[in-house]
Image: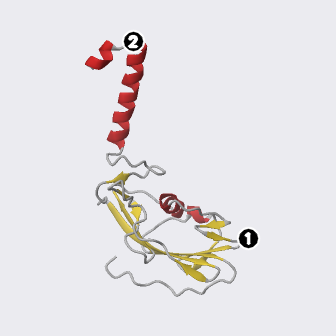
Amino acid sequence: MNAIRILSAGAGAAILVLTLAGASAVAADPSGTPAIGGITCDRAEGSVFHIHQHLALFDHGRPMTIPSDIGRPLAGECLYWIHTHSPDGLIHIESPKFQTFTLGEFFDIWGQPLSATRLASATFARGQLHAFLNGHAYAGDPRKIELLGHSVIVLEAGPPYASPAAFTDWQGQ
């Protein structure tokens, strides 16, 4: 505050505004990593809401790897509420509050596109994305698929289309 008093009133007000804005950003997210769609990157996993889903992606019949540590920025030393730990397709939701999350939010945190014509690094003709939720065809916007406990989601860019085996390995999840 002493430094602000020494400066002219206009410059001091600008410094005060910047200082308050910086303090507000730090208080909202102590890791310094920006929130994505209202989902913050916290220093510890949330313990109020904890569920898992399995996601399988296929590019013209070939399985695509879903990397480990999505939602775990190296420099941020934090963890988004939606994240992966390993490259096995398991999505972890560990949130400090009950909330409905979507597949689109997972892709936003991953930093990959998801739409009717884009599936991460896969490219394909319009209308060629096939989506399945719990073994049933899903005709809506894939970004709006809700991430519910033990949901099994398969997205295929094709053709050809794979016939993926049902995921049942929820042991320990």
Name the residue at 62% across, 83% down. 61
Looking at marks 2 and 1 on the same chain, the residue that comes earlier in the sequence is marked by: 2
State the image coordinates of residue 71 (x, y, percent, origin top left).
41, 61
Frontmost residue, 108 versus 95: 108
Tell which of 82 and 171 is nearer to you.
Answer: 82
Amino acid on which the number 1 mark rests in the picture:
Ala
Number of marks in picture: 2
As drawn, is 46 to the left or to the right of 67? left
Going by the numbered disc 2, the residue's amino acid type is: Ala
Chosen colour scheme:
secondary structure
Q: Residues within 10 Å of mark 2 (few under 14, many from 20)?
A: few
Please state which of residues 60 and 150 is positioned toward the viewer in this rendering.
60
Tell me the number on the disc at residue 125. 1
Q: Position of residue 21 (x, y in %)?
A: 39, 32
Q: Position of residue 81 (x, y in %)?
A: 38, 59
Q: Position of residue 79 (x, y in %)?
A: 35, 58
Q: Is residue 86 above or below residue 3?
A: below
Could you tell me which residue is drawn at 65 percent across and 83 percent down?
161
**Residue 9 - label:** 2
Q: Quadrant of the N terminus?
A: top left
Q: Nearer the viewer, mark 2 or mark 1?
A: 2
Quadrant location of the C terminus? Answer: bottom left
Distance from Cα at disc 2 to Cα at disc 1: 59 Å
For mark 1, does the 10 Å Cα neighbourhood hold few (<14), some (14 to 19), or many (20 or more) residues? few
